[in-house]
Amino acid sequence: MLSPLLFALACSTTPTDSADPADTGGADPDAPPGQTMKGTAPRVTAPSTADLPTLYAENAQFSVELLQAVGGATGNQVLSPYSLHLVMAQVEAGADGAAKAAILDAFGWTLPDDRLHEAFNAAGLAVSAHNVGATAEDPAVALTSTNQIFVDTEYVDLGPAWLDTLSAHYGTGVQVLDFGADPQGVADDINAWIAARTGDHIKDLISAPIVSSSEMMLVNALYFNASWAVPFSESETSDRAWTLLDGSAVTAPSVSGAVSVYGADADGYFVAEIPFSDEGLTLTIVLPDAGRYAEVVGALDWATLQAVIDSEAFCEECEVQLPKFEMEGKPDIQGALVAMGMGDAFGGAYPGIHPNLTLTAVMQQGFVAFSEKGVEAAAATVAIFDDSATEPPFGPVVVDRPFVWFLRETEGAVLFAGSVVDPR
């Protein structure tokens, strides 16, 4: 079964340059602009797997809650809990006080820091093990996850212990760029980096205004491309009936055929799992009973779902019909995280990263395509940091009542003066 870290929903171009687990890095704190620096700690290539069950369970439950928080009970969504987990685990490694507590509470992580990041390392290496390249048995299997930090030239003095944690457990390096000199160029460079690692599906996550208002970005790029264990025949693809949430009927392009499926009934829904050519990967579908979609999705929890999955029976040749579609989107990840209790993390203290930097935004963009051959999916997540010392001491300023005004020289004459009691 596919690790619940990967999809909440989760076949063409394979991304390049995924992180090398054996890369030892070798940080130069005085690296000039444009160069890459890393922590001095080598990548831990054989981490303990003892805490993986705890991490998987916590992250799976968070995945369900995140899907609910972004509106999965009412509309189309595509997101990557795994990509978000990786970015925010690295953020957590440098957090302190209320910010750290808020991240741990929102994500449900209970392991102490050293074991948490070692468990993430083990999970990451397990994910990378699926990316074996095309073979006769597995004609299309790609699964890559790459982390990178982009930082402004004025903030290269990042915490060495934090960089060592990232180097040892996440294979993360730091690219030094001049954010202020050419914001559009920096945005283009980061977007190109992301596109090259997401099958060219995520191209415009970062904009020049985002670069101008930030000092550092932690980015993860995730790409998935796998064939079904038993592919669907294209000749069987046709428009089939589809019922919308309001009960009205439409048609949608759908694939169909007799394929291998695991399945089990539950209270109010049916669970089906369609395996990929890599037997360690699967697509889990929760199909609520007619008229109960919002109820089932709103009440879903992973422990209950896992119990249903554990009870599944296997059907070697089962008739299956799935919609054939492509979807992309930018869910309101930050709004969801705040709603889930992470508000104190924004504007909080991150002394392990830099005494003057604070988390200001988290964004994600996703893509998914279902076809006769399999599933292709991509996502990129970015955590944005700004200089906390430059945060405004008050605001916003809303002039919505009578006021007086003076047009003056800053060190001289008052040139004009007036009052406004009715601006109409």
Image (tube, rainbow, N blue to C red):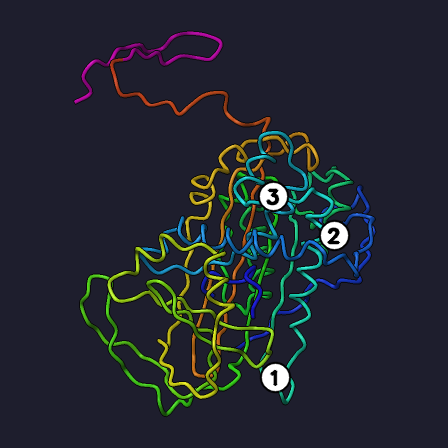
Res. 242 image quadrant:
bottom left
Residue at (53%, 68%) from the top-left corner? 200
Report crowding for label 1: few under 14, some 14 to 19, many 20 or more residues within 10 A (C-alpha).
some
Residue 168, how many percent across, how many down?
77, 52
Residue 47, how many percent across, how many down?
77, 57
Residue at (54%, 41%) from the top-left corner? 212
Bounds of the magenta segment:
403-424
Amino acid type, residue under disc 2 in the picture:
Thr
Where 183 falls versus 14 (above or below)?
A: above
* Image quarter (top left, top right, bottom left or bottom right) of the C terminus: top left
Instruction: Give the residue number, with chain letter if any, for mark 1.
Output: 138
Residue at (46%, 80%) from the top-left corner? 261
Number of labelled discs?
A: 3
* Residue 414 falls inside the magenta stretch: yes
Res. 30 image quadrant:
top right
Dots 1, 2 in contact, CB < 8 A: no
Between discs 3 and 1, the one toward the N terminus = 1
Instruction: Give the residue number, with chain letter if any, for mark 3.
Output: 179
What's the mark number on residue 203?
none
Q: In this view of the protein, which residue sits in the foreground, 273 or 197?
A: 273
Q: Nearer the viewer, mark 3 or mark 1?
A: 1
Tag 1, which secondary structure?
A: loop
Tag 2, which secondary structure?
A: strand
* Residue 198 falls inside the magenta stretch: no
Where 221 falls versus 310 (above or below)?
A: above
Where 362 falls versus 370 (above or below)?
A: above
Instruction: Give the residue number, with chain letter if any, for mark 2.
Output: 36
